[in-house]
Image: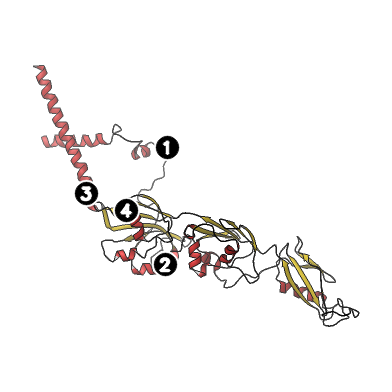
């Protein structure tokens, strides 16, 4: 009977522990959920699908430090050389017309002493409609055409009037084949693309170079509605990412301090800045204060990331649960620090910007928490029973 009364006392204390009379900084989770007008809550399933990957030597062989994006994946496929430059509105061109002998349309018999049978027309600017004007050939379309195509068109128009005409056109001033460079460079502005082609680093160099540390610099390329961002040092390290620019491209250079977040059973929790070119998993654990000896489970050091689908496919991860258009898959990487060899893996695994490092509690810690709770409840129950007995005895004494 006494044991049953003790159990009732414990249960009543548990009920008291959840009431609003206990200290708190605001409403509890149950209060918020129970008093909501409407709610959308995850119950039986996870809010996000994700994959779990153990860090191994085979996984490391696939992964690198690609940064936030890739110019090659976004713009470089199928293009091995510079883009073919077209003449555009506002360009100034110079036209020279040759004839095989004097006495023709442009070189009369009485031309006198001359270095050759040709005439150079006054330079002209491509008008707003995209045309240039050639004597005896009329208005010739130039906009959106290469110099070779324009030359062939003029020759065709003059072939019935001039003596075996040949035409040479050169662009003396460009206004259409330009790249805009803005942001944190030495000299922002518009730059002409050289006829031989310019790569991204060529343009940045001509714009005065970057003004901040390379490990804090990012470059965004915008082209015809498509945009991609790359870590500057990846642009330098990987020649395939240093793609050719195209007319009307915009390059935006900016500074951003990369960081990762750590919490759980680590010495320190919070956001940690890279402040260096690369941060490895071993570095990240160290920056977060290491693993708490009395709390952490070294076999469950987790890193959360949105991983490129192509990388997971190379690892042979089954992605059938994810739609084909999901290019970044929620991924949890697990390092088992109980295995001595895992420390070598951690020294080769790159942490990416905005990764989340989480160190789980050991199972015995959760058990200790539970036992501490039970001990507190039992102690409170015993104290309450003693107080009640003391009160009864005092009452009897006073009544006498």
Q: Is residue 347 visible?
A: yes
- The CA distance from mark 4 to mark 3 is 24 Å
Q: Earlier in the sequence, mark 1 or mark 3?
A: 1
- Look at discs 3 and 2 and give the one toward the viewer: 3
Under circle 2, the secondary element is helix
- Which of the 4 quarters of the picture holds residue 250? bottom right
Q: Earlier in the sequence, mark 4 or mark 3?
A: 4
Question: Position of 198 compared to 355: left or right?
Answer: right
Q: Which mark is residue 37?
A: 1
Q: Earlier in the sequence, mark 2 or mark 1?
A: 1
- Look at discs 4 and 3 and give the one toward the viewer: 4
Q: Earlier in the sequence, mark 3 or mark 2?
A: 2
- The CA distance from mark 1 to mark 3 is 37 Å
- Residue pointed to by mark 3: 367
Question: Position of 296 compared to 128: left or right?
Answer: left
Under circle 1, the secondary element is loop
Question: Position of 79 compared to 91: left or right?
Answer: left
Is there CB contact under 8 Å for labels 2 and 1?
no
- Which of the 4 quarters of the picture holds residue 167? bottom right
- Residue pointed to by mark 4: 289
- Residue pointed to by mark 2: 313
Quadrant where the image shows the N terminus: top left
Quadrant where the image shows the C terminus: top left
Query: Of 341 and 222, which appears nearest the observer?
Result: 341
């Amino acid at each position: 009977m006494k044991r049953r009364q003790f159990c009732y006392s414990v249960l009543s204390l548990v009920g008291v522990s959840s009431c609003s009379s206990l200290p708190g900084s605001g409403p509890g989770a149950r209060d918020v959920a129970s008093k909501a007008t409407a709610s959308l809550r995850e119950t039986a399933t996870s809010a996000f699908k994700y994959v779990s990957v153990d860090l191994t030597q085979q996984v490391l062989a696939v992964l690198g430090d690609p940064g936030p994006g890739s110019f090659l994946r976004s713009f470089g496929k199928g293009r091995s050389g510079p883009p073919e430059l077209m003449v555009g509105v506002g360009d100034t061109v110079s036209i020279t017309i040759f004839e095989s002998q004097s006495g023709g349309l442009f070189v009369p018999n009485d031309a006198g002493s001359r270095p050759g049978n040709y005439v150079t027309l006054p330079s002209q600017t491509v008008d707003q409609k995209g045309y240039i004007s050639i004597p005896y050939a009329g208005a010739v379309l130039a906009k959106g055409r290469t110099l070779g195509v324009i030359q062939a068109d003029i020759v065709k128009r003059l072939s019935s009037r001039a003596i075996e005409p040949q035409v040479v056109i050169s662009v003396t001033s460009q206004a259409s084949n330009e790249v805009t460079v803005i942001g944190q460079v030495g000299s922002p502005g518009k730059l002409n693309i050289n006829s031989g082609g310019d790569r991204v680093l060529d343009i940045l160099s001509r714009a005065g170079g970057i003004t901040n540390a390379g490990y804090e610099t990012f470059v965004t390329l915008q082209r015809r509605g498509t945009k991609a961002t790359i870590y500057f040092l990846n642009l330098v390290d990987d020649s395939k990412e240093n793609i050719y620019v195209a007319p009307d491209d915009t390059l935006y250079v900016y500074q951003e301090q990369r960081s990762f977040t750590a919490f759980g059973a680590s010495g320190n929790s919070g956001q940690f800045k890279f402040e260096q070119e690369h941060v490895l998993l071993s570095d990240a654990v160290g920056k977060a204060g290491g693993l708490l000896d009395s709390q952490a489970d070294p076999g469950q050091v987790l890193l959360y990331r949105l991983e490129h689908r192509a990388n997971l496919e190379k690892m042979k991860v089954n992605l059938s649960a994810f739609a084909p258009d999901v290019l970044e898959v929620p991924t949890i990487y697990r390092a088992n620090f109980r295995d001595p060899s895992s420390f070598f893996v951690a020294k080769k695994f790159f942490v990416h910007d905005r990764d989340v490092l989480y160190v789980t509690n050991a199972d015995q810690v959760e058990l200790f928490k539970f036992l501490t709770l039970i001990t507190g409840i039992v102690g409170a129950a015993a104290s309450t029973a003693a107080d009640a007995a003391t009160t009864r005895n005092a009452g009897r004494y006073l009544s006498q």
